[in-house]
Amino acid sequence: MSYVAKSPWIIHYDGSSCNGCDIEVLACLTPMYDVERFGIVNTGNPKHADVFLITGAVNERNKGVIKQIYDQMPEPKVVVAVGICACSGGIWEECYNILGGTDKVIPVDCYVPGCAARPEAIIDGVVAGLGVLAEKRARMEKGLDPEGKDEAAPEAAVGAPEGTEASEAEKEA
Amino acid sequence: MSEEKKYLIQNFEPITPDKLLERVRNLKDEGYRFVQLCGINKKDHYQLLYAFDLDHVMLLLRMDITPDEEVESITKEYWPAFIYENEVHDLFGIKFLHNALDYGGNFFTTSEPTPWAIK
Amino acid sequence: MSKRTIIPFGPQHPVLPEPVHLDLVIEDEKVVEAIPSIGFIHRGLEKLVEKKEYTEMVYVIERICGICSFGHGWGCVGAIEGAMGIEVPQRADYLRTIWHELSRVHSHLLWLGLLADGFGFESLFNHCWRVREAVLDIFEETTGGRVIFSVCTVGGVRKDIDNATLRAISQKLEEIKKETQKLTGVFINDTSVKNRLCGVGYLSKEDATELCTVGPMARASGIVQDIRLTGNGVYDEIGFEPCVETAGDCWARCKVRIDEIYASINMIQTAIDKIPDTEIAVPVKGNFSGEFALRMEQPRGEAFYYAKGFDEPTKFMERMRVRTPTNMNIPAMVKTLQGCDLADVPMNILTIDPCISCTER
């Protein structure tokens, strides 16, 4: 995608992450990677946000928190799962308190693998997410449901960054 | 500068539940700092491991308890121990008496109750 | 008496990226009581000892926390090596110390940035993180990872750093030091920053002792307590001295961490000058047995590791316990929050340098 009409704001929630991906998400915003030059701003308020970044796997306690933040975000919205824990549970999959990846609770549009996910990969993931966001907005302008719930065959998650096909395939397997 | 390798000193001391409070009180008077408390599942009983520190040398109290035994809380001497006692309660199901700050099982919300307990 | 209100803080809060929840009981603008509740990140990873062999467990423990991951890895292998009686080659010990101290530099710079963000000084936050990227580049060059390295293994380290690279690191650190000096001057001397930090969150030496605080929090209240004094690693050979302040407020905690950045840089440079040419790992075979309790000085304070094998040695451990520094500092945080202004709550929480994913594991 060549340009974004509106500056997308992101909200970040730390599921049960080890902080590794969290600090990489923050690193994206700081001078070295500096996504703010694209107008991407980190906000603390779900009601201002377009993109929801989740790091870490989902557990019993934060399930409700993630659901609530997601529900508070206005349509159209995109969810990006950052790091392998948010994608599938990662090495914590076998732990007694882990339910699995973010998609156990809310629909996820983009998966960014890695332990920890590198800033380049996170930026790629968010940019891919913006593509999904534009599609959802277009659908809303036509008066359709942004998530495609009113269509017979819901569209599959699109636009994962390059090099993630393998892990995507793994997930579906 | 430390000339000796203090970290190699491993002081493990067995203790019984009835002596625990008295020993902890003595340690407090001697100026020991509370380091941690953890539970160990020994298949037929539990073991509690209390760690204390004085001048960078650690002392560990090892206490064996039966599965349904209730343990006296040490929060009266060391208030920060409430974190560990709530944790051990939620994960192992061991009950602590007279805990100064009892979360009543709501410290850790786990998908299954007392995941570490003897099954 | 004015009316009491309860203000919930977290788990999703702009000032703190990590989920901790506090119920702040407020009277006018003063906090009367703070009730912490945690458990948002509890994964139950200590239970993985039943499924992972002791050599694999190192990489699980390393992922407790992405900020002090190297220290966790070292603590875990240290406990295992202690229990099995493995002697690590000198060069491995030096390399571990170098990586651990580099982690401290990166962790403290990260924390300084978050603190600046906490009191609304956004450009200072960005500058701290810019300098920090130089440290991450060193990690990437030497281990391949930016935040999680998986370079520590039972018996030594998995990667060597050749001497030319080490000398280049020493040079780079000199530049990092110069850059950091420009920033830390603002934290220590700037009037508006001092207004936010000085006298806020005061913790006396008596209270700090009573509440069993650890790490920079204890050292800022005048307690000389640093696990690096216990002789683990090569700290006795590279001129380690603990950094202690006496003021006990947020500013003192900030000062301790700033001093530690410089102390760590100096120690790394000394270690690079002294590093011996030996093997970097000894082969480890066989089953795990014995028990060992070890403590490490993490950037946030004392961490406790306990490894215990079964009576019949197997590939698995019976128990691997990790107690992390934030666990021990939460009582002190609750104490400093009592009686503080609502506007100072973020400062009080940030200056213990909370690491919630460490706390809950």
Image: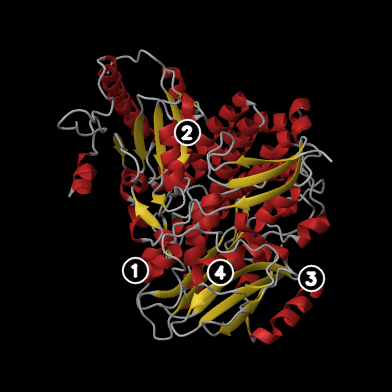
Q: CA distance from mark 4 to mark 2?
A: 38 Å
Task: State the count of labels.
Answer: 4
Q: Is residue C266 visible?
A: no
Q: Position of residue C355 (x, y in %)?
A: 56, 49
Q: Which residue is mark 2?
A: A27
- Please, is residue C347 above or below residue C332 in the view? above
**4 vs 3, front mark:** 4
Expressed as whole percent of the image width and height from the top left, the position of residue C75 reads: 52, 63
The answer to which image quadrant residue C50 occupies is bottom left
Left or right: C351 in relation to C107: right
Task: Classify mark 1: helix, strand or loop.
Answer: loop
Q: Is residue C170 above or below residue C211?
A: above
Q: Which residue is mark 4?
A: B89
CB atoms of marks 4 and 1 within 8 Å: no
Instruction: Answer with left or right where residue B119 lies relative to residue B60.
Output: left
Amino acid type at circle 3 is Gly
Residue C86 horizontal/vertical position (percent): 46, 74
Chain identifier of the residue bearing label 1 in the image? C
